[in-house]
Image (tube, rainbow, N blue to C red):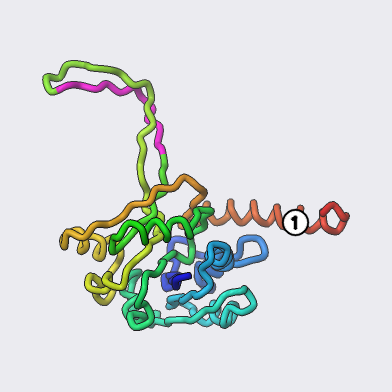
């Protein structure tokens, strides 16, 4: 299976005060850090050759995961300066010589049950230089909506319709040619993908409905941590009682 890159260079400012002393991917969900869940998801989908890009408090991640052997994967690290972060896409530039074939990019603070293997296979079949995974979501409107024709005549009504959206999940499958659109400190969403569209390069979209969460707010983190901690507690005491 191809290499997978996990982006973990950010400072996690939206999750302060939790991230003042701990990098965001190392925040605990129950007994394990967020990043361990991400790595286990990659492993279960066949991605065992992993490169982690680091910046803020990188030593904590390296000390915990080491070479990855304890987690059934192989891990290499690419460490950038905390003072001069390279951003999501820019952090791949030092890895250009390592990425000669199709590769996967995920975020170190996102959780998902999406089939990453199917996503990557879909990318290979698409023939595109890049594929983006999109979470299908729906936002219900509070009011009824009228549809008008070109002459402002009412054609039909919808009562509190659900507006469908496709949210970028920060999961990408990329070809080595992507480096032609990556400059130092570039961001994928702001710089790289617009660059591809300007060059008339096709970007493949992969829509999924499985679980996905960007742990971007303290409320998200606290709620999820409480849920997983409760599950861990119940499982532990069930094992003690011999129920499992």
- At horizontal 20% and vertical 21% (from top left) the residue drawn is 148
Camera-side residue: 206 or 94? 206
Q: Which residues are magenta?
A: 138-149
Q: Quadrant of the C terminus?
A: bottom right
Residue 191: % across, % down: 24, 65
* Residue placed furthest toward the left: 151
Q: Is residue 27 visible?
A: no
Residue 160: % across, % down: 38, 25
Residue 179: % across, % down: 27, 74
Q: Is residue 31 visible?
A: yes
Using residue 11 as the reference point, say whether residue 148 is left or right of it.
left
Residue 117: % across, % down: 48, 60
Camera-side residue: 191 or 74? 74
- At horizontal 44% and vertical 73% (from top left) the residue drawn is 3
* Residue placed furthest toward the front: 125
Q: How many marks?
A: 1
- At horizontal 50% and vertical 47% (from top left) the residue drawn is 210
The correct choice, above or below, for 180 with respect to 123 in the image is below
**In which quarter of the view is residue 232 placed?**
bottom right
Give the residue number, with chain letter if any, for mark 1.
Answer: 233
């Amino acid at each position: 299976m191809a290499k997978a890159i996990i982006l973990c260079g950010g400072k996690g400012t939206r999750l302060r005060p939790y991230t003042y002393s701990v990098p965001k991917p190392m925040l605990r969900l129950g007994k394990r850090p967020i990043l361990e869940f991400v790595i286990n998801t990659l492993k279960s989908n066949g991605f065992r050759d992993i490169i982690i890009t680091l910046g803020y408090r990188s030593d904590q991640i390296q000390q915990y995961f080491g070479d990855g052997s304890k987690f059934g994967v192989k891990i290499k690290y690419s460490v950038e300066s905390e003072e001069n972060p390279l951003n999501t896409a820019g952090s791949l530039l030092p890895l250009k010589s390592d990425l000669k074939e199709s590769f996967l990019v995920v975020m170190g603070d996102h959780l998902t049950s999406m089939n990453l293997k199917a996503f990557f296979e879909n990318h290979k079949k698409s023939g595109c230089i890049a594929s983006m995974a999109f979470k299908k979501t729906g936002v219900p409107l509070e009011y009824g909506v009228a549809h008008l024709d070109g002459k402002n005549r009412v054609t039909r009504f919808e009562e509190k319709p659900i507006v469908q959206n496709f949210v970028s999940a920060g999961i990408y499958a990329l070809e080595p040619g992507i480096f032609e659109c990556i400059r130092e400190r570039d961001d994928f969403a702001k710089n790289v993908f617009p660059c591809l569209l300007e060059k008339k390069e096709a970007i493949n979209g992969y829509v999924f409905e499985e679980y996905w969460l960007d742990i971007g707010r303290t409320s998200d983190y606290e709620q999820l941590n409480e849920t997983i901690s409760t599950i861990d507690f119940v499982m532990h005491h069930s094992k003690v009682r011999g129920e499992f």
